[in-house]
Amino acid sequence: MTEIVLTTINARYVHAALGLRYLAANMGELAPRTQIVEFVLGQRAFEIVEDLLALKPRVIGIGVYIWNVDEATRVVALLKKIAPEVTVVVGGPEVSFETGEQRICALADYVVTGWGDISFPKLAREILAGNAPAQKIIAGEQPPLAQIALPYAHYTGEDIAKRFIYVEASRGCPFKCEFCLSALDKTAWPFELDAFMAELEQLHARGARNFRFVDRTFNLKVAASQRILEFFLARMDDHTFLHFELIPDHLPDALKQTIAKFPPGALHFEIGIQTWNPEVQQRISRRQDNAQAETNIRWLKEQSNALIHVDLIAGLPGEDLASFGAGFDRLHALGPHEIQVGILKRLRGAPIDRHTEQHQLRYNPDVPYNVLATDCIGFNDMQRVSRFARYWELVGNSGRFREALPLLLADKPFDNFMHFADGLYARTHKTHEFAFERLCEFVHAHLIEVARVESSVATAAVLADYQASGARGKLAFMASGVRPRDNKRSTARANMRQARHVEA
């Protein structure tokens, strides 16, 4: 009999909620009475509630995150109207701070803040035994990691076959970057390595090949990193895909030697640069050796087969558009496969809030809480950067404009692409739902009319990109009789990019 339902609303089906599986693994004697049920953004709240109540639970625990808080709030509101006798418990990073300001916290019966691995099972026990606590806000207990049961047996066969398998060799972060909730951690705590490796072995034996490590600092402890990478090297096959988040300025030679052994398409590294500006770094308590980070990114691009994805954040306190643009150009010169341009968000509880008044940080009051203006970047320019970020995904990161992109960027990547973004928005007033053919036509027109690229060069580049995509339609500027030339260029990198962005 299901008395406890653990649920959340994932961004996409391919995401399997690691947090729910930790809760399930630590339910103890309540495990046989507990069930995980996951939903996906886009499902109607009424349908979610209907599915949940069909299980006749007494307790429903809901994982709440920045991407699902609006939908989760609607679900909780309906649950408390339709089935007020069911106890609703919410937890997760979005409801761990500023609980008094959130409708979902007011609606729920209980709010577990912080770590829930031990605290939620304890609360569920008390509720089912008729000893529900009087206080609504339950401060999550952070036990030693050895006391937390590992969750990986709770990945189903369907998860392994069709979804990303999220794992973590450590929790926490020793760094204090103020835009991140991990700035509140005192350090990073590793799970006992032998036990973790045994779980990896079991997952791999069951057929898991797509592993996403959620560690904030995978390469913090090189010996552990080495052991994990060597585990996968010894079991490498064509389906292996591994995602790690790396500290940019910490890549010892021993780790480089192991990374260099992986074949193309197997490794994906996400690297947070965020800003190259030393004054901004100091202001937000970010420690980063820029020269070493630059050296490491260059080595990864030139000496490894890994796919390199690097993050920059626009809107950090004290950074103006010129500084951010210079940082983009510096990063682009290193040649990472993807540059993600993000906009600063005010995550609930993150220390970045201490700069709000001094630097006139004005945030969106609704999800995703993105900064709308600062003392250095006004609202109009922040809107331009937001559109730059969206168009960069479509043109720069998509892998579909390998010939045309260098012509668009030329010798001033940030300025020239911003010019393109401004022009594209002026023509369309859209940031989404571009047909590929229409996008090719915009790129072609901009190259000739604005960038002053010779017509035959621009046409050849865009047609080569169009043909390489596999499209077989007819672009508007082909009416003159121009046809795609034979193009046999390799699509290996595009395939790697597609593997990375299955969830996008």
Image (spheres, grey):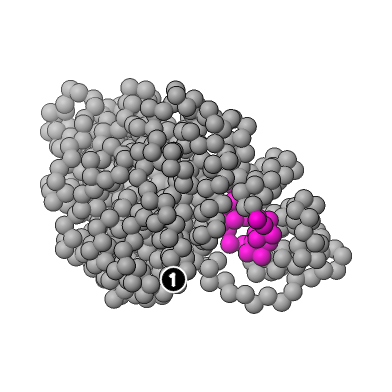
The quarter of the displayed image where residue 233 is located:
bottom left
Q: Is residue 479 visible?
A: yes
Is 123 on the left or on the right of 105, as rendered?
left
Query: Which residue appears at 53% of the width and 68% of the height?
Result: 493
Q: Residues within 10 Å of mark 1 (few under 14, many from 20)?
A: few
Q: Is residue 486 above or below residue 193?
A: below
Q: Is residue 472 above or below residue 504?
A: below
Circle 1: residue type: Gln
Q: Is residue 88 visible?
A: no
The quarter of the displayed image where residue 103 is located:
top left
The residue beneath circle 1 is 303
Question: Which sits in the foreground, 302 or 392?
Answer: 302
Is residue 253 found inside the magenta-colored segment of the image?
Answer: no
Q: Residue extending furthest right?
A: 480
Q: How many marks?
A: 1
Q: Is residue 259 above or below residue 359?
A: below
Q: Give the x, y percent position of residue 431.
A: 63, 44
Tag 1 secondary structure: helix
Query: Which residue appears at 51% of the width and 40% of the height?
Result: 314
Is 478 on the left or on the right of 158, as rendered?
right
Query: Which residue appears at 54% of the width and 49% of the height?
Result: 328
Is residue 407 found inside the magenta-colored segment of the image?
Answer: yes
Q: Find the magenta span and give its range.
A: 390-411
Q: Give the x, y percent position of residue 335.
A: 53, 61
Q: Give the x, y percent position of residue 148.
A: 16, 49
Q: Give the x, y percent position of residue 223.
A: 22, 63
Question: Which sits in the foreground, 111 or 391?
Answer: 391
Query: Which residue appears at 64% of the width and 52% of the height?
Result: 412
